[in-house]
Every structure is written in structure tokens, then in C-alpha cells.
Amino acid sequence: MNRTGNKASRIKDLIPGVFENMGISDRLDEGRLVRDWPEIAGESISSNSRVIDLRDGILYVVAKNNLWMQEISFLQNDLIEKIGERFPGLEVNGLRTFIEKGKGEE
């Protein structure tokens, strides 16, 4: 392995510990949750929604329309369970969905 690859892998391994020491490791998991939303929610849901925030244990998700908002709400418990399995240190107790506003809407 070349020096650059070795150094990069060492830095990558150090980042979670640095975040933990700073008391912000949950922020790293929040970023991973956004990144992993397609795997957690599945292709259909993830292509029609996106995670916008996690605050006080509530995951905020924007859906493209009312149909997808209802589908996500219906699957809320399954989604929260999958998130808990993937990110055991991340507190997600509920899910709130909103309909995405179209361009030009206020």
C-alpha cells in the first residue's frame, strides 16, 4: 500500500474518536443516516423523499406528495426500527413528514 492510502485510512479511522471526544459523534451518525436513507427506506420511498433534520429524537422527512407522505407515515415504526439497528447510538423516537413545496411556492 502506498503512503497516501495508508495515511488516509489512518485519518478515516481517527475521525469517529475525535468526534466522540468532542461530544458530537451523534452528528456523524446523523450525516450517515442522511447518506444511508436509500438503503434504510428502500428505493421507492427514498426516491420520493429526503431526510432534512433530526432534532430531539424526531426525524423530519420531506415527501414529494401526499401519497408518499402517507406511505412514510404508515411505515414509520419499521423505518425507526431499521435506523435503530443501523445506528444504535442515535436516538430516533418519531418521524414527521411534510410535503415538499414546488419551486416558486412559499
Image (cartoon, rainbow, N blue to C red):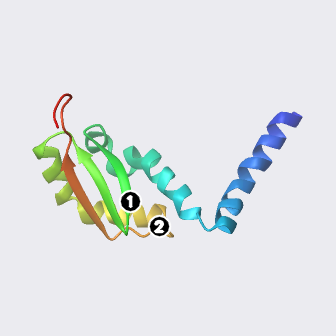
Image position, residue 29 (x, y; %) = 52, 58
Residue on which the image places disc 2 = 90
- Label annotation for residue 54: 1
Question: Which residue type does callout 2 highlight?
Answer: Leu
Image position, residue 78 (x, y; %) = 29, 63
Nearest to viewer (mark 1 / mark 2): 1
The secondary structure type at the circle numbered 1 is: strand
Residue at image position (53%, 63%) is 26
Nearest the eye: 30 or 78? 30
Q: CA separation, marks 1 and 2? A: 10 Å
From what the image shows, is residue 8 above or below residue 90? Answer: above
**Does label 1 or label 2 sit earlier along the sequence?**
1
Nearest the eye: 19 or 43? 19
Quarter of the image for residue 102 reads top left
Q: Quadrant of the N terminus?
A: top right
Nearest the eye: 103 or 98? 103
Quarter of the image for residue 43 reads top left
The secondary structure type at the circle numbered 2 is: loop
Q: Do residues under tags 1 and 2 come within 8 Å of each other at their CB atoms?
A: yes
Lateral position of residue 21 relative to residue 40, left or right: right
Residue at image position (83%, 41%) is 6
